[in-house]
Image (cartoon, helix red, strand yellow):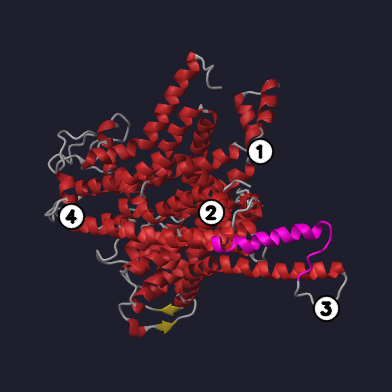
Amino acid sequence: MGSVLSTRAKVWWAVITVVVLVGALFPVLSIFMTSFKSSSDINSGTFLPPRWSVENYEQILTSGGSAQELFLSALRNSIGISLIATVIAVVLATLCAYAIARLNFPGKRLILTTALGVSIFPVVSIVTPLFNLWRNIGLYDTWPGLIIPYLSLTLPISIWTLAAFFRQIPWELEQAAQVDGATPWQAFRKAIVPLAAPGVFTTALIAFFIAWNDFVYGISLTSTSAARPVPAALAFFTGASYFEEPTGAISAAAVVVTIPVVVLVVLFQRQIVSGLTQGAVKG
Amino acid sequence: MNAEAGPAAEPAPRGRHAAGSSTEDGPGPTEAPPRADRRRTPDAEARAARSDRTRAEARLGWYLAGPAFVVMLAVTLYPILQAVYDSLFNYKLTAPDERAFVGLNNYLVILTDPVWWQALWVTLLITVVTVVIELVLGFALALVMHRAIKRLRGLLRTAILVPYGIITVVSAFAWFYAFDITSGYVNHWFDWVPGVGPDLNWFAQQGTSLFVIIASEVWKTTPFISLLLLAGLAQVPGDLEEAAKVDGATAWQRFVRVIVPNMKAAIMVAVLFRALDAFRIFDNVFIMTNGANGTEVLSLLAYRTSIGQLQIGMGSAISVLLFLCVVLICFVAIKLFKVDLAGARGDK
């Protein structure tokens, strides 16, 4: 249908595309603009900043900025905790999904159903007991104290997504390679790894997004900058002075943590879409 | 790296197993396993070997899948059981020594408190409204992406993945600041709309607060539902639609009579997943109103009771009730609407 679009159809598609783009990106653009308003312009009531100012970015990024310590430690926590939770989940899920896709064993359905059950679990339901337990055993306000519950978010979706990916891998290739004289390890590395790696990578990406997005665990199980991740830190930002709303600093911090998301989405949109839908509806 | 080291050690024996099973069905059991020392008919021998192999495969399967399974149970089953236990006590961290068993009293207190029913009602309202809007918008988006030429499709998908990937709290702030009476521009832009003007404080009353909360939720999560629907659309046989077109069906007729019935499973799954997700709404409400002016939702109520007021017993009871609500929604969806989650999610 590509080449024979009538002029009218072209106009329609242009309109639709613009509508979708504006709809999808406008709130991002909105906070982007807010982040460049100086503290005197923050209540200007305009979409565009009357004067472009990097004052807010100085507050969160440069030494001496009022929110710098708070923001950078939150950024460090978020990246570290989310990455570790992602790696653990993907390693465990790879083993699990491999078994589900390739081996026949009783309990396969049970595992998949459990993963499904865990993924629809209301986070708030388990945060209270964890809060109490973590305080007693010293995991409150620590990295492991968040990494462990994050597994409840990242592991189930990783298992589903990877199992769906692994089911589509033509595993006979491995035997074919062995017949051609490759050792089992070579056969695995040369035939299977290149086919499985994209699925593992995509799963890791989705799991990371989910961990990166967490808020409930973040505000409930941390109290200081020792482990507080970005979303929770944003909610507890304070202004440069008591009377000042931290609007500008929060906006700037929001933009900084959104940039990697946009970059990843632009680079890997195809993989993310296939990963999201693989785990969900493909049979 | 590690992710590959696991299965790496394993496929070799598995490969041989597979090779063995193919010879066994072929010319005959010429390579009888050396372990079968008692003389049997070749058939029985093959069966014994197969059950050995079945057992070995089952063991390997659980070695590989077990850790993930155990971790999943440990991070959810244990806490929810603990919550059930704690909910039977009058237990406040502000006075831990006064901890006392009260049976189901906490539940009685909650279920007779209008605060609970108000939060439940608001949560259900948000859930139903967002899911309905998202289903319509998501379908429209999915159809657009489905029909779009290739170059456009990549652009559209990239654009709608931005709301999906963005942190919910960030999106909540973006919407909040846009509508906020002091820093926002919405009041200036839309002052021609009756009721909107420079004095409108969106977050000072229930209706307008919920409007912004729902709008931000819809913006953030419609991409997800539309991608699920897009995958469902891909499964609708193209020739069916073509045939309907030839027979003179209008676009709307084709949509209602051909497309929707053929992707019912995908729609149901998308709706259920979104409904469960919306029911747990927390982040945007916390950021925008923190539950003020009749916008408190169940998750927030549970959070404020246990983490905010340190009433572990009461908070646990709310957590358990919230969990039961989710189970109930699932149950209704699966029994009443026959949503086949496992089937639809790839478990054949």
Please tell me which residue is depicted at 50% across the width and 56% down the height of the picture. A158
| Disc 3 residue crowd, few under 14, some 14–19, many 20+, Cα 10 Å | few
Depth check, mark 2 against mark 1: the one in front is: 2
Q: Are marks 3 and 1 on the same chain?
A: yes
Depth check, mark 3 against mark 4: the one in front is: 3
| Disc 1 residue crowd, few under 14, some 14–19, many 20+, Cα 10 Å | few
Q: Are marks 3 and 2 on the same chain?
A: no
Q: Is residue B111 left or right of residue A251?
A: right
Q: Is residue B346 left or right of residue A208?
A: right
Can residue B132 be seen here? The reply is: no
Please tell me which residue is depicted at 55% across the width and 64% down the height of the picture. B9
Q: Residue furthest front?
A: A181
Q: CA distance from mark 1 to mark 4?
A: 54 Å
Amino acid tagged 3: Arg
Q: Nearer the viewer, residue A44 or B209?
A: A44
Q: Which residue is mark 1?
A: B261
Q: Which residue is mark 2?
A: A189
Q: Residue furthest right?
A: B41
Amino acid tagged 4: Ala
Image coordinates of residue B30 in percent, x first then y, are 81, 64
User: Magenta residues, as a range?
Assistant: B8-33
Q: Is residue B112 left or right of residue B209?
A: right
State which tag comes first along the sequence, 3 or 1: 3
Q: Nearer the viewer, residue B197 or B178?
A: B178
| Disc 4 residue crowd, few under 14, some 14–19, many 20+, Cα 10 Å | many
In the picture, the disc for residue B38 is 3
Q: Nearer the viewer, residue B330 or A156?
A: A156
- Chain to which mark 2 belongs: A
Can residue B165 be seen here? The reply is: yes
Q: CA distance from mark 3 to mark 1?
A: 59 Å
Q: CA distance from mark 3 to mark 4?
A: 78 Å
